Image (cartoon, helix red, strand yellow):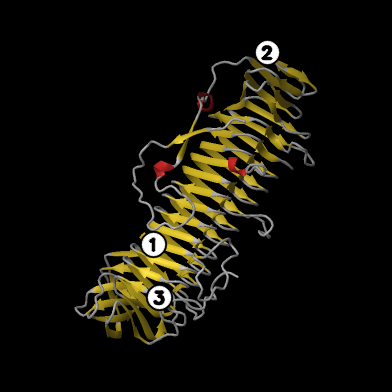
Amino acid sequence: MKKTTYILLLIIISIFITSCNQKTSSTDLPDNVSDISEVIYKDEDLLDTYDSSDDVITLTNESITSSNQLVSISDDIITITKEGVYSFSGSSETATIYINTSDTDLVVLLFNNLDLSSDNGPIVYVENADKVIINLTGNSSLTDSSNETYEDDAVIYSKDDLTINGLGSLTIQTSYQKGIKVNDDLIIINSTINISSFGHAIKTNQSLTLKDVTLTIDSAGDGIKSYDDENETESLIFIDGGTYTIESYGDAISSYDLTVYGGSFTLTSGISNTNISTTSAKGIKTTHTMYLLNGTFNITSKDDGLHSNDSLIIYNGTYIISSSDDGIHADDTIELQNGIIEITKSYEGLEASNIYISGGEISITSSDDGINGSGGSDSSSNFNFDHSDGSYVSISGGIIYIYANGDGLDSNGDIYMSGGTVLIAGPSDNSNGAIDYNGSFELDGGILVAAGASGMAENVSTSSQVSVKIGLSSSTSDIFQLQDEDGNDIITFNPGKTYNSIVISTTDLNVGDNYNLYIGDAIDSYETTYYGFYTGSSLTNQSLSLSFTIDSKISSVGTSSSMGGGGGFNPGGRP
């Protein structure tokens, strides 16, 4: 079996990305984009056009003709047994192309406005070859019109390596079959491919490489799937640019390992899927590791938006995710190093045993926890009460906004924050907290602002800078502003929901200084804003809520709640 060759990526990425601090995961993830492998293409894979062919096959419903008789034609089956370049044009409702050459032969099929359909098996069947290339010129189509499934269940079925290239287009429609199925490696370059399929649109056992493809899929199975139950470590997907629009009943994209170098993705998974417990319906899923180096992603999923059974790393890109389950989930590790991530709907925004955030702009809306460090798989967030399960959340950079109905920033183990800005609009009910942890919360830098209900409210456990928990005498949904005694704006935040507890930590707070907390209904002016977080701002219709003096680095002022620092009952975790 032939494999696509990989070498270390030698190009220098324009944006330098630093590695996450205090990595404790057992998974050995690369720290920089330059550590990720790059696909190397062969010359024949990149060839868009051919000047000549060895044989020209012309098809009609009445006849099939061959210019040089290099193929055999019998009962509408065109059989190729020799290496060469074969040009196909015309249309037929019954013809099929069968390839059976030696293990070293390269066979090229030129599709020039070819229109074929069949109701009794694959239209293109590769029994044996070194590699087959389908080169597209003009607009071609292959249609499965069968009334039942057949054993070799795809319109294009190849037991060996297959490449589709050229500047033309190919439309595949199936009644009961898959669109394209390849037992070895599949490469698609530059072409425009449209697939409407009853089964998986594209299925490979080994690697699938997509480069600068315009791909549109409507699938009653998975959109793109690479999986080999005998050796899943060979089931890899590489996507290097292009435009991808996928609507699927199952997963939009699924593989063992996935690397995306760039591209534009509009993915909708779980369409008409009413039971995701039996048929996975994730936006993008890997059973091992997912590397997202760049790209623009718009994902709407019935199941998790991005999911890895092991580890998931985002270096850069733009991600808009609306999920009926988790926005981004990994059983082991999530690393977010850069990019813009907007999770507009989720059960839990980010969930993994280990979560490392070192950069980027991240906004999360969740019906349960916003960020949840919780051991194991989707269903492993058990009621751990005050016992740490070893989970770890580390934040060293970036700006993070969380709007959560459950816990805002939650770890069933420890939380460590050394930089960045974290803004939490936490729960309004007392059964959850804006901050929740079962181990420790060590704060060593950055800006932390958390507002929510007081019943489960927690401060950090240790800190190198001042962190103050403020209890209000009554609940409010207005904007709050913390000022120093000279009237300077320290923190201004509009949680956009009801709260009566606030946690604030910033280097602008000092032990022994006096502060005033004001509540107002609108912002009069400001310098910058991010999801209700304002700098250089002034309030209108403000009223003094509380005056206090900070007496220690970790302090509580105002009305006391039932929780202090440290762990506690956590009913907000997934059962």
Q: Which mark is residue 67?
A: 2
Q: Is residue 273 visible?
A: yes
Residue 252 sits above or below residue 562 on the image = above
User: Which quadrant is home to the C terminus?
Assistant: bottom right
Q: Residue 372 versus residue 143: which sits nearer the camera?
A: 372
Q: CA distance from mark 3 to mark 2?
A: 77 Å
Q: Which residue is mark 3?
A: 451
Total residue callouts? 3
Percent across and percent down for residue 225 are 62, 44
Task: Label 3: state its secondary structure.
Answer: strand
Percent across and percent down for residue 411 are 47, 68
Q: CA distance from mark 3 to mark 1?
A: 19 Å
Q: Which residue is mark 1?
A: 395
Pointer 2 and pointer 1: residues touching (CB < 8 Å)? no
Which amino acid type corresponds to the residue marked 2 in the rendered image? Ser
Which amino acid type corresponds to the residue marked 3 in the rendered image? Ala
Mark nearest the camera among 2 and 1 is 1
Estimate how packed mark 3 is, as few (under 14), some (14 to 19) or many (20 or more) residues with alpha carbons within 10 Å: many
Q: CA distance from mark 2 to mark 1?
A: 67 Å
Q: Looking at the image, which residue is at 43% across and 47% down?
A: 30
Residue 548 sits above or below residue 161 on the image = below
